[in-house]
Amino acid sequence: MASTSSILRAAWVPDDDPERDWESAADLAVAWVRQECAEQGAVGVLVLNAFGAEQQIPSLQRFAAEHAVTTPRASRDRVGRGKGPVLAYVPDERTLDFASGLACGSSLTVVESVHGFPLEGWARQLGAIDLTRPDEQPEQFDSELAEAIDRLDFYKNNGFGDQFGKQQAQRILRDLRGAGLLEREVVLGALAAKGASDRAVRNLGKLIDALDRS
């Protein structure tokens, strides 16, 4: 996955309002990514969990007709890498990972589904613009939480799959829980924004779940 430094600008549409339908959410994201494409003189990319989702929403359908559209299961060669702004629609961990790689050196906007992969931590880590509240400043992390996220990022290289990585992560997570700062989805989203692979994010989620059961 791309790191925070390789994505120039980020935006998102949070899944936080039952009155906002998926079409309205997509419309906000499409408008933003179109502006990014115009400013960068680049072709955009729509990234989906699976082909066909774009046919349900007019703005996505139009965007897909004018730009590239792909999924993690498709060949990356279809759209290149780091070529232009990316819109990821309700991504899970794997799709977000894929979309972030494509957005390398450009910009990324995401429509969140909390049932797919909650993005609050991702947005806070990247300082992503909330397209439903574009005039508000993105929320920052508490310094203790930010330091812990940096430490988790340091040990992520093997996807928290080796014994040493697991032990270090468990120690950091216990400290966060003791400080009352362990919010599962926030931590996972932040690690995703810092470049953790979808495998690393899933493994860290399992470690948090095991800690919560202990």
Image (cartoon, helix red, strand yellow):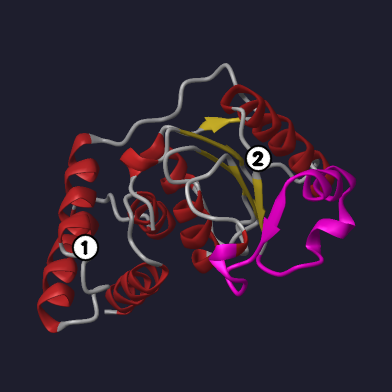
Question: Does residue 16 appear left or right of residue 104 in this picture?
Answer: right
Quarter of the picture holding the C terminus:
bottom left
Q: Which of 198 and 187 is in front in this view?
A: 198
Which of marks 1 and 2 precedes in the sequence? Answer: 2
For label 2, count other residues whose C-alpha is less than 10 Å away and answer few (under 14), some (14-19) or many (20+): some
Name the residue located 32 percent from the left edge and 50 percent from the top edge: 194
Is 173 included in the stretch rendered in magenta? no
Q: Within the image, what quadrant is residue 211 found in? A: bottom left
Percent position of residue 98, x then y: 50, 61
Name the spot of residue 207 as percent of width and height, x first: 29, 75
Residue shown at 60% from the left, 75% from the top: 73
Is the residue under label 1 in contact with that under label 2 (CB below 8 Å)? no
Quarter of the image for residue 52 reads bottom right
Amino acid found under the numbered disc labelled 1: Leu
From the image, state whether disc 2 or disc 1 is nearer to you.
Answer: 2
Q: Give the range drawn in magenta.
A: 49-77
Residue 23 location, quadrant? top right
The residue located at (43%, 57%) in the rendering is 185
Above or below, 58 relative to 157: above
The residue lying at 47 percent from left, 21 percent from top is 137
Say which residue label 2 marks: 43
Residue 21 showing in the rendered view:
no
Label 2 to label 1: alpha-carbon separation: 41 Å
Q: Residues within 10 Å of mark 1 (few under 14, many from 20)?
A: many
**For the residue marked with disc 2, what is the amino acid?**
Val
Depth order, front residue of 72/161: 72
Residue 67 placement, left or right of 40:
right
Q: Does dot 1 land on a helix, a strand or a loop?
A: helix
Residue 85 x, y percent position in the rendering: 58, 39
Residue 73: in magenta span: yes
> Which residue, given by chain and number where applicable, does mark 1 sit on?
173
Residue 2 visible to the viewer = yes
